[in-house]
Image: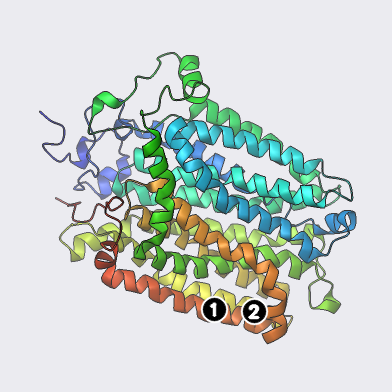
Amino acid sequence: MDDKARPQDIKESPSLSPEEENHISHVVLIPQPSTHPRDPLNWPLSRKHVILAVLCLASFSGAIAPLSGQLNLADQEKLYHKTKLEESYANSAALAGMAAGPFFFAPISHILGRSSVIFWCVLCTLVCQIWGAVMTRPDDYIPYVISRLFAGFFGAVPTVLGPRIVTDLFFLHQRGRAFTALHMAFMFGTIAGPTFSGFVSARSFFPVEFWWTVGLLGVTLVCCFWFLEETGFDRECLERNPSMPDGFLANRFATFFFGTAVVLPTSWKETAKVGLAPFLIGLCPVTIIMGIFTLISFGFYVGVNALTPVWLQKPVSEGGYGFSLEQNAAFTFCHWIGIILVHFYGHYLNDRLPLALARRFNGGVWKPEYRLHVLWLPSLVINPIGLGIFGAALQYHLHYMVLALGVFLVTIGSLASVPVTVNYVVECFTRYPAETGIVVGAYRIVYGLTISFYINPWVEAVEVGWVYGMMAFFAVFSFFFVMLLMWKGNAIRNIQFASLGSSEEGERLMD
């Protein structure tokens, strides 16, 4: 009997936790797995979780690397004879690399495999960290900035290829938590990197903030080699799937060193189509609408995060707080607390709430827009309040704990939107999850990439309080784009290139 003849019930799946069996015992598996043991959907849940954990580690390490020099501006200022604002351009270069790299590697992963590309990108990120660490001469400023550019170029790849692996491994009702874990690992890396580097280099010369990341990336490289597996699988034509070597070392070398041995066969035409897909997806109305929301909502967090060290380390006489490097590193723990709360929020709501809405209002039939309702509290309420508090603290030079409260709220409000927006747009283009993640990631980064270049004129024009006050109003305005998708998402999603369109709308999730 064909495996697609009857929708498989959730209880028949080998890859479900006891918690899922208790809470959602009547969910139908989407997509339907094949009967082939090589199908990643049929793998045991423990195997999937190990791969996801290593993927999260690679995302975490890849995010730490390019931004690890974010706090120690004083040493660089003295060495390179640049201002703190000019030193922050290295962070902008890192963000530019993080936006650009995935566009290059997505089509390559189609040929060489997701796991292989992630492995080699982690290795290249390690090399870039060594490059940054040896830039210790006064005339090394430009090479140092370029090292940050390439660290971001390679470092962001695991997070962007991650959505493709997540959709290969997990069913629709599991993806929300998997996306939350993946993107929170990346976001935690952007916070933990500056924190650890700040403490490590507080009483040392700044290159030490790169050397410790070399060890972390080395451990990540070993974990990738040991545990990552190629997850591409064709359920329509089982004969296309290559056989996997049985021996451990043979399997590892086939996956990472011998080209396309374990990857679905493809053509250069198909690869070119994959390379073009991010640009076509970026032109679709649903992507533009969600991208504008992401650009504003998350972009302000990137701007706050990138410039907070500048405000904290400015002398009190210049409107700053006169923080030392250690004090600045300690301040970043308000980000840590926020991101931990976001992870719990996403873990418990990003799948449960959409499934509950489908059951309550649509007879168990799925619509991707149900995922967006998770955003009401963080994006419409918490994020604008946090931006307002942050601006008021700087304007009136309030106690640094008030500033920390603002950063904490902005962290919750902005980061809670990341896995939801990526998951939603990926489910609008289910055949191109990595390419979709690239586009959404570029929208997330572009504002933070440019803010260093115009924040000073903006502050001079309206004063610092109103800079962040305006951001708060813009954040409220951006949520109207989400509401538009909640209202007319189906019609908007249908306006797209025919070759790209694919979603799971209309699938019955509940028996």
Q: Which residue is mark 2?
A: 391
Q: Are marks 2 and 1 in contact (CB under 8 Å)?
A: yes
In the rendered structure, the answer to whether residue 16 lies left or right of residue 199 reads left
The residue under label 1 is: 472
Give the image location of residue 349, x and y in percent. Answer: 37, 59
Residue type for callout 1:
Ala
Q: Left or right? Give the position of 341 relative to 375.
A: right
Residue 69 is situated, as x and y percent measured from the top left of the image, at 74, 52
Residue at the (64%, 36%) spot, across then down: 124
Camera sees residue 162: yes
Instruction: Tell me which residue sits at (89%, 57%) in the image.
Output: 78
Looking at the image, which is closer to me, 13 or 244?
A: 244
Expressed as whole percent of the image width and height from the top left, the position of residue 406 reads 61, 72
Task: Give the vertical position of 250 relative to 197 (above or below).
Answer: above
510 left or right of 452 in image = left
Q: Secondary structure at mark 1?
A: helix
**Total tally of numbered discs in the picture:** 2
Neighbour class for label 2 at 10 Å: few (<14), some, many (≥20)?
many
- Residue 225 in percent (x, y) is at 54, 26
Can residue 65 be spotted in the picture? no
Q: Nearer the viewer, residue 268 or 224?
A: 268
Q: Alpha-carbon neighbours of circle 1 within 10 Å: few (<14), some, or many (≥20)?
A: many
Q: Earlier in the sequence, mark 2 or mark 1?
A: 2
Numbered disc 2: secondary structure = helix
Between the residue at mark 2 and the residue at mark 1, the CA separation in whole angstroms equals: 9 Å
